[in-house]
Amino acid sequence: FEAAVKRAKDRLDRPSPADWRSLVAAAAVAERSRGARTRFVVKQGNAHYFVPVDQVDWIDVADNYLRLHVGRKAHFYRGTMNAAEEELDSSRFLRIHRSIIVAIDRIKSVRSAENGGHLIELANGVELRSSRPYTDAVNALLR
C-alpha cells in the first residue's frame, strides 16, 4: 500500500503532457508579447541556424516557406507572410507586395512604375516591384 501511495505522489509531482503543452504555449505568447522578432530559426538538414533579423535584406514567398535573403544567401523558413509582417518591427520592415517584405534600411532608391506601383532598388542592386495596394505604404517612406 505504501509503495502505491508513493507512486501516486510521484505521478502527481510530474507534469503531464497537457501541462507541458500549456507551458510551451505560454512561452510562445510571452515571446510574442516581448516585442518584435529578433531572429529566425531555420532548419537545414539536421541542423538549426539562427538568422538575426537585422541581417535580412528582404523576404519573399516560396511555396509554403518564406525565403529570407541575407546578402547572397537565401534561407527557407516555414511561415506565412502575414505572420512575418506582424512579428517584424514595422519601423524596420515594410511590406511592398503580397509576397515581399523589405528591410527599409537596405533601400537605395524608389522609382514610380507604370502600373501605379514602385520599383525599389536595394543597396545590393536587387530590384523589387511593389504593387498598387501597397503604394500608400511606400509613399509614406518618401515623406
Image (tube, rainbow, N blue to C red):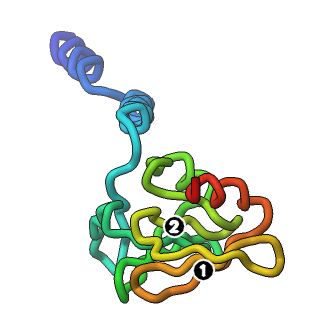
On the image, the x and y values in percent for residue 7 come to 22, 21
Please tell me how crowded label 2 is: few (under 14), some (14-19), or many (20+) other residues with Cα within 10 Å: many
Task: Identify the residue at horizontal 28%, vertical 65% (top origin).
Answer: 50
Residue 22 or residue 137, whichever sits in front:
137
Residue 27 shows in this picture: no
Residue 65 shows in this picture: yes
Q: Are marks 2 and 1 in contact (CB under 8 Å)?
A: yes
Mark 1: amino acid: Leu
Please tell me how crowded label 1 is: few (under 14), some (14-19), or many (20+) other residues with Cα within 10 Å: some
Q: Which residue is mark 2?
A: 102
Q: Which residue is mark 1?
A: 128
Task: Identify the residue at horizontal 79%, vertical 65% (top origin).
Answer: 132
On the image, the x and y values in percent for residue 110 come to 58, 73
Which tag, 2 or 1, sits closer to the chain's start?
A: 2
Q: Is residue 8 left or right of residue 60?
A: left
From the image, which quarter does the N terminus lie in?
Answer: top left
Task: Identify the residue at horizontal 35%, vertical 33% (top origin).
Answer: 34
Task: Identify the residue at horizontal 53%, vertical 55% (top origin).
Answer: 84
On the image, the x and y values in percent for residue 23 come to 37, 30
